[in-house]
Image (spheres, rainbow, N blue to C red):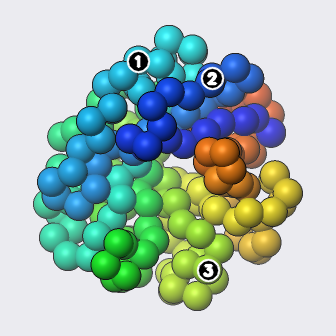
Amino acid sequence: MIRGIDVSSHQTTFDTDGLSFVFIKATEGRSYTNPKLSAQTKRARDAGCVVGYYHFLWPGNIKAQAEYFVSKAPEKAGDLLAVDWEWTGDHTRASNGEKDRFIREVKRLRPDHRVLLYCNRDFWLNHDTTSYAGDGLWIADYVRAGKPRIQAKWKIHQYTSTPLDKNVADFENEDALREWATPE
């Protein structure tokens, strides 16, 4: 397995030593853009990491949210895209159908990019009804790295948030991730 992190505007800086990938929060809803998006992208690219972007999904206006996300997330071959499906600050959540529609719309808008679903174990086991994760499941379950407590096949496992969100990806090496990230 290979190692990576995910960051948002809360991380002023981050260490890239030993990392193969970095996911960066790009957008949320239809109006928020991470003010550190450009600087964080540059840092990850300068370190030679595979770069991914994620959108924090709110209920409603799914097509508009997908369009907003792809308008703000940089577009470079081999970049990964993801939807972050969890409780909002208002303790609401996008429905399972909205999550599925968002992934399909982003795949339609960016057909040359892999699109993943990020969610925690509770959402996967108790809110998901279709098991649709686009091109791969990115599961958050704070247990031993690479051992999430689910039966589904996963691509990325977020195993801790201390001191920041740390992940492992189920790829033999960074080259295998790069090859997968660029669909033919």
Residue nearer the viewer, 128 or 87: 87
Give the secondary structure at mark 2: loop
Q: CA distance from mark 2 to mark 3?
A: 29 Å
Query: Could you tell which of marks 1 and 3 lies nearer the N-terminus?
Result: 1
Mark 2 lies on residue:
16
Closer mark to the observer between disc 2 and disc 3? 2
Q: Quadrant of residue 4?
A: top right
Q: Residues within 10 Å of mark 2 (few under 14, many from 20)?
A: some
Amino acid at dot 3: Asp
Image spot of residue 29 (x, y percent): 23, 61
Q: CA distance from mark 1 to mark 2?
A: 12 Å
Residue 122: mark: 3
Amino acid at dot 1: Lys
Amino acid at dot 2: Thr
Query: Could you tell which of marks 2 and 3 lies nearer the N-terminus?
Result: 2
Q: Specify the farthest residue to the top.
A: 46
Residue 138 is at least partly visible in this image: yes
Image quadrant occupied by the N terminus: top right
Identify whether 149 is placed above or below 106.
below
Image spot of residue 170 (x, y percent): 74, 45
Residue 108 is at least partly visible in this image: no
Residue plotted at (35% across, 53% down): 55
> Is 179 on the left or on the right of 130, as rendered?
right
Mark 1 lies on residue:
42
